[in-house]
Amino acid sequence: MPLSFCIVDDDAAARRMLQHIIEDSGLGEVAGTAECGQDGVRLILSECPDIVLMDLLMPDQDGIETIISLQAQGCRSKFVMISQIENSDMVGRAYRSGIEFFIRKPINKIEVEAVLYKVNERYAINRYLDEIKSSLSKLEGLQFGLPPVQISKRSVREIIQPILMNMGMVSESGSRDIITMMELAATHSNRGSLPPLKELYEMAAASYKTVPAEAAKEVKAIEQRLRRALSAGLTNLASIGLTDYGNPKFEYYAPLYFDFEEVRLKMREIEQGRDSGKVKVNIKKFLQVLHLELLDGLGR
């Protein structure tokens, strides 16, 4: 059964574009659209969609307020936020309100598809797990005389390393920092909430047993290693995209982990055989997405 979607955005062109992407890509069916938060609340409570695409800034109430209002009224839909806002505090508030991912404006078809495929996959996994839990609950109290099944859990490194490998980053010295920070984040954060970058850098530096006098220098070194690692990953994905735009690694990782405008800029640079030094990497976005993938892998 296809998943159902609702779209809440005050931009009519954005609503039409998102609806076409969802339906043309076979991601699901759009049950309805709304142009403001209050209309969106009525629509969503009426349709009970599986997934809601919610604009962050709307004239009557922002998307975060709308999501909180819906959850207070028992809504169990999954939320994806749409916004051109890059403010880290606002992004943090959105994740704490329970969103799954961000889609950044201007809307890009490849990014929307990549994000929604990931949300669909997560939804299907959660539904499957719920069915298993339901089946197991019916067996409670039954004794079969069998020893309990030991379920092996993957470590943070086992989850993160293949992702970095797929992006061509695992050989970079910054990959060690990324794994360390994800190990620390898994211990110190709740679902959807990633500690601020500075705090992550400081925790990583402390875990390396850096002496206090050298801590500030190590924090800067960590950030530099991260930028180099992410730049290597971006360059690798851009090279793959130039060779095969439909390559699954490029289609999945490039728009999900990086700002796609920067990916396209890097592709043009590679094509022209130059390096302008203007391509930027968004460390915050990269680590937020990686953290969500980690939590999925850990079953949280």
Image (cartoon, rainbow, N blue to C red):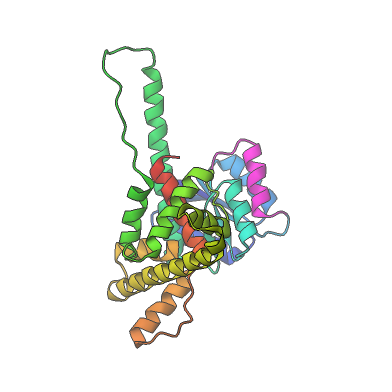
Image quarter (top left, top right, bottom left or bottom right) of the N terminus:
top left
What residue is at 31 percent from the left and 12 percent from the top?
143
What residue is at 31 percent from the left and 67 percent from the top?
246
Outermost residue on the right side: it is 60
Choose between 283 and 143: the one closer to the eye.
Answer: 283
Residue 106: quadrant of the picture: bottom right
Residue 235: quadrant of the picture: bottom left
Q: Is residue 236 above or below residue 118?
A: below
Choose between 283 and 126: the one closer to the eye.
Answer: 283
What residue is at 46 percent from the left and 56 percent from the top?
289
Span shown in magenta: 61-77
Residue 62 lies in magenta, yes or no?
yes
Residue 92 drawn at (x, y percent): 60, 54
Residue 12 lies in magenta, yes or no?
no
Q: Is residue 264 above or below residue 27?
A: below
Residue 241 drawn at (x, y percent): 33, 72
Image quarter (top left, top right, bottom left or bottom right) of the C terminus:
top left
What residue is at 57 percent from the left and 60 percent from the top?
198
Residue 234: quadrant of the picture: bottom left
Choose between 77 and 231: the one closer to the eye.
Answer: 231
Residue 296 drawn at (x, y percent): 42, 45
Choose between 5 and 64: the one closer to the eye.
Answer: 64
- Residue 213 visible in the current orientation: yes
> How many numbered discs sit on the rendered protein?
0
The reply, left or right, for residue 195 in relation to residue 229 is: right
- Residue 1 visible in the current orientation: no
